[in-house]
């Protein structure tokens, strides 16, 4: 292994990288910070008006002193209206960065969308979030797109009462609503997420509630402005299984009631199978397989997806030894120019020596980026 | 009636089985009526105003070379059981016996020092349990040297062998923990424990912080080491599919009580306790065609410092009747070592003849 592959670089190298970064970031971040940008700059049209969000070849990088982290490196998938899209993959594969890009909540200035489009359907028009300045994004966040985080305390302020925090969110997007109306809407939201004694909870502090109740409040907060898309990033990972079952049941019920789309991010294949209509499997910053939930779970094609499914013990399914994928994820600063999974893949074919595999359509909806399916799908198109 | 009495677990039964048993050291660990209460302090002077009953009257035995899984939701006392067994935190009452006759609390400090290496623990968080200032070879070897487990001239070879058994490489000896990934750090923790040639290891959520593909590696490693060194594990986890994979017997905890205990096959095929049934039904299965017949428990987990009266599960139990609110259930032996603490299975509790009643708010 050459020195370049290790995590260490000299102080001189770091200074050089840092200087280059500053130049790039000044340009990228400067564009984001502009005020009063005409809407025409970020207006766009959806490829399919049935989608609420379309990620199109999104690249989001972090410009750090040790090099550029290609956290999201060419991600494309759609979120259809009223559907749940599950995004699954191992820690660090770019699930959160993808969703934070849609919210424009990347850590600034190091984290930047460098290319690609994120088309967001507002009904009468569509915006390209990748081109939107922070200023314009404020009206979108919480209103059109809202987010539920893993740890409810990151979204709740411990020093304010629950009711006050819900009221704030409502007021922010409904200027002109009377105080009574706002309060009533908050209380309705608390009722909606199945917490008894909504009036009582309205005047309590976050720390007076259990973890499961706090997550319900966070869900209430995400729903209160009738968003078109809800991003749920590991919404149940910090919760116990019986409480997780309650929250998943709640999300399912609410989805039917509010007709929003959900982007559900989790590393738990079981949760995805239960909730999602569509599944997106990510590996090292790219989508390796996507399709209807049934297609991906019952007929997984990408060697990584197959490996992931085999390595998880499944209740009441006996195996003597768990499969474990050999090797480890490539360094996100030094991605190879061939299939990112090749160094761990036990199913390589001759074509894998070549460049990164194209998207191959197994069916109209089931798409896998792997050379094994190139011939079968007649050069990727499936036709 | 007398048949019923015999079904109730009591100390007499256990004594007999130990004395007449096929070699007492067959059991690496016997836990009898273990209790651990933490004081709740209040006010300026730290006056004790009550106790958290973190572990209450827990009994079980662990055979050599087997794995017992301990499951339950957060705060139910799993970690506390692990720590009190190893006397890392003193128990309130009850007995913990290793290898048939070793009582840690009756040992002199010299005896204790000699026995310590035999019982080890691996924690969930491999980051905080490794000293950042020591190279990995030293982390693994420190206690080995301290206890003179191998002659000095064999020390290096020994550490190399242990590292290789745990999937680490010889050349990594001089590296520091921060240079390793989460999965590798967990391997270091395992190597450190295994190097002391233990009989028994408490594994407290050893794979919970790891990704699925890394989880599989660590689970396989633990299984290989068990076979190689005839290790006995107490495997604590809230992930039931992992527990089902790795365990021979399973104990289910709720608010400090072990509400059900049985062989793995038995408990997953035939869960008896209403809590176990709800817990098992809540596991998400990675197959979209399977629609689980899910029992959704109402409400949240009560605080262990102020547990409900009678059966602690009664506030969330769909089978709750009047007797459940008044009286704590006894632990019944249902045969084949399957025990359960619930009035439904106790013919003397009066549960069967009582009218249905809705659980109180
Ligand atoms: N602020 C940051 N600075 C530098 N690199 C970052 C930053 N945030 C994320 N990254 C990198 O981006 C990549 C993707 O991270 P991301 O948080 O999206 O992963 P994830 O799939 O959500 O993982 P997890 O399951 O652990 O939440 C990783 O390599 C990560 O180290
Ligand atoms: N050092 C301590 N002091 C006071 N209470 C404690 C202490 N350690 C644990 N507890 C309490 O004991 C109960 C059981 O905790 P623990 O064994 O850590 O649960 P688990 O491992 O099952 O999540 C919890 O209510 C916890 O808050
Ligand atoms: S393209 Fe080749 S190396 Fe990559 S996953 Fe497919 S078979 Fe494996
Ligand atoms: S004793 Fe009563 S409340 Fe407790 S688990 Fe059994 S039926 Fe439910
Ligand atoms: Mg994440
Ligand atoms: Mg614990």
Image (cartoon, helix red, strand yellow):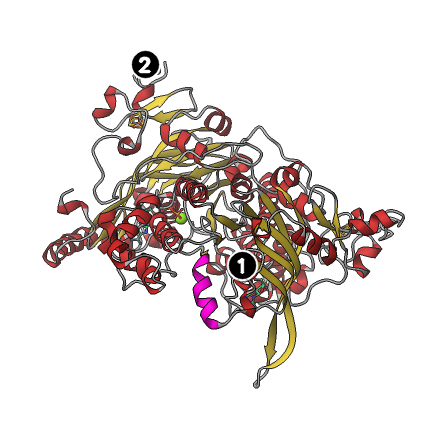
SS of the residue under disc 2: loop
**Mark 2 vs ligand 3: CB under 8 Å?**
no
**Mark 1 vs ligand 2: CB under 8 Å?**
yes
- Residue A34, can we see it? no
Q: Label 1 marks which chain's residue?
A: B
Q: Say if A124 sits above or below A96 in the image.
A: above
* Left or right, residue B318 beside residue A135: right
SS of the residue under disc 1: helix
* Left or right, residue A379 beside residue B257: left
Q: Say if A72 sits above or below B197 in the image.
A: above
Q: Which residue is mark 1?
A: B82
Where residue A230 appears, as percent x and y from the top left, is 49, 45
Q: Which residue is mark 2?
A: A378
- Identified at 38% across, 25% down, the residue is A367
Which residue is at the front of the view, A118 or A276? A276
Q: Label 2 marks which chain's residue?
A: A
Which residue is at the front of the view, A187 or B259? B259
Which residue is at the front of the view, B305 or B357? B305
Residue found at the far bottom of this picture: B45
- Identified at 50% across, 49% down, the residue is B232
Which residue is at the front of the view, B248 or A12? B248
Which quarter of the image is occupied by the C terminus of chain B? Answer: bottom right
Badge 2 density bin: few <14, some 14–19, many ≥20, Cα 10 Å? few
Tell me where the magenta segment starts and ends, as one range.
B109-118
Is residue B58 on the magenta stretch? no
* Left or right, residue B138 beside residue A164: left
């Amino acid at each position: 292994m050459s020195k370049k592959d290790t995590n260490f670089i000299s102080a001189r190298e770091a200074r050089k990288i840092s200087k280059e970064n500053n130049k790039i970031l000044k340009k990228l971040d400067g564009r984001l910070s502009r005020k009063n940008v005409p809407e025409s700059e970020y207006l766009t049209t959806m490829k399919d008006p049935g989608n609420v969000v379309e990620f199109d070849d999104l690249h989001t990088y972090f410009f750090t002193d040790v090099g550029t982290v290609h956290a999201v490196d060419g991600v494309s998938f759609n979120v259809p209206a009223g559907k749940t899209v599950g995004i699954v993959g191992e820690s660090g594969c770019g699930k959160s960065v993808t969703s934070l890009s849609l919210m424009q909540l990347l850590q600034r200035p190091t984290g930047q969308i460098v290319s690609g489009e994120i088309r967001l359907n507002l009904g009468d028009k569509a915006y390209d979030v990748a081109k939107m300045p922070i200023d314009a994004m404020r009206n979108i966040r919480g209103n059109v797109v809202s987010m539920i985080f893993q740890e409810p305390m990151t979204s709740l302020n411990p020093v304010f009462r629950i009711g006050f925090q819900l009221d704030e969110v409502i007021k922010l997007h409904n200027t002109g609503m009377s105080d009574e109306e706002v309060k009533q809407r908050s209380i309705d939201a608390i009722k909606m997420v199945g917490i008894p004694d909504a009036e009582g909870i309205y005047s309590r502090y976050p720390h007076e509630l259990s973890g499961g109740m706090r997550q319900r409040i966070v869900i209430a907060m995400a729903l209160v402005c009738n968003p078109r898309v809800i991003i749920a990033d590991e919404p149940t990972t910090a919760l116990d299984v019986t409480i997780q079952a309650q929250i998943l049941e709640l999300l399912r019920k609410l989805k039917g009631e509010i007709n929003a789309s959900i982007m559900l991010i989790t590393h738990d294949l079981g949760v995805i199978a239960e909730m999602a209509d569509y599944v997106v499997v990510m590996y090292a910053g790219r989508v390796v397989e996507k399709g209807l939930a049934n297609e991906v779970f019952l007929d997984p094609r990408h060697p990584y997806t197959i490996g992931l499914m085999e390595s998880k013990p499944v209740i009441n399914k006996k195996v003597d030894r768990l499969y474990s994928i050999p090797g480890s994820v490539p360094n996100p600063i030094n991605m190879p120019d061939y299939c990112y999974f090749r160094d761990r893949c036990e199913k390589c074919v001759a074509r894998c020596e070549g460049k990164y595999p194209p998207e191959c359509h197994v069916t109209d909806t089931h798409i896998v980026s792997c050379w094994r399916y190139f011939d079968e799908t007649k050069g990727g198109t499936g036709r | 009636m007398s048949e019923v009495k015999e079904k109730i677990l009591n100390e007499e039964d256990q004594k007999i089985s130990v004395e007449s048993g096929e070699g007492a050291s067959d059991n690496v660990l016997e836990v009898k009526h273990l209790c651990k209460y933490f004081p709740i302090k209040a006010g300026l002077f730290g006056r004790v105003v009550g106790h958290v009953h973190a572990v209450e009257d827990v009994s079980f035995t662990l055979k050599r070379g087997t794995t017992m899984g301990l499951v339950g939701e957060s705060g139910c006392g799993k970690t506390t059981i692990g720590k009190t067994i190893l006397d890392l935190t003193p128990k309130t009452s009850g007995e913990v016996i290793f290898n048939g006759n070793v009582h840690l609390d009756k040992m002199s400090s010299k005896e204790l020092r000699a026995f310590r290496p035999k019982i080890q623990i691996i924690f969930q968080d491999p980051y905080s349990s490794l000293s950042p200032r020591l190279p990995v070879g030293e982390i693994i070897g420190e206690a080995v040297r301290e206890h003179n487990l191998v002659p000095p001239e064999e020390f290096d070879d020994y550490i190399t062998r242990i590292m290789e058994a745990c999937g680490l490489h010889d050349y990594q000896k001089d590296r520091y923990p921060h240079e390793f990934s989460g999965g590798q750090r967990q391997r270091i923790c395992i190597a450190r424990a295994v190097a002391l040639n233990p009989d028994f290891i408490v594994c407290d959520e050893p794979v919970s912080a790891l990704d699925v593909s890394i989880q599989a590696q660590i689970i396989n490693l633990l299984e290989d080491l068990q076979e190689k060194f005839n290790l006995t594990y107490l495997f604590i986890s809230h992930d039931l599919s992992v527990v089902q994979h790795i365990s021979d017997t399973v104990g289910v905890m709720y608010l400090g009580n072990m509400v059900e205990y049985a062989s793995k096959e038995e408990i997953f095929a035939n869960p008896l306790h209403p809590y176990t049934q709800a817990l098992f039904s809540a596991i998400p299965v990675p197959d979209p065609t399977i629609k689980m017949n899910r029992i959704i428990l109402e409400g949240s987990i009560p605080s262990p410092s102020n547990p409900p009266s009678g059966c602690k599960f009664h506030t969330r139990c769909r089978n709750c009747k009047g007797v459940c609110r008044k009286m704590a259930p006894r632990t019944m032996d249902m045969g084949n070592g399957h025990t359960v603490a619930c009035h439904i299975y106790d013919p003397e509790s009066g549960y069967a003849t009582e009218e249905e009643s809705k659980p109180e708010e």
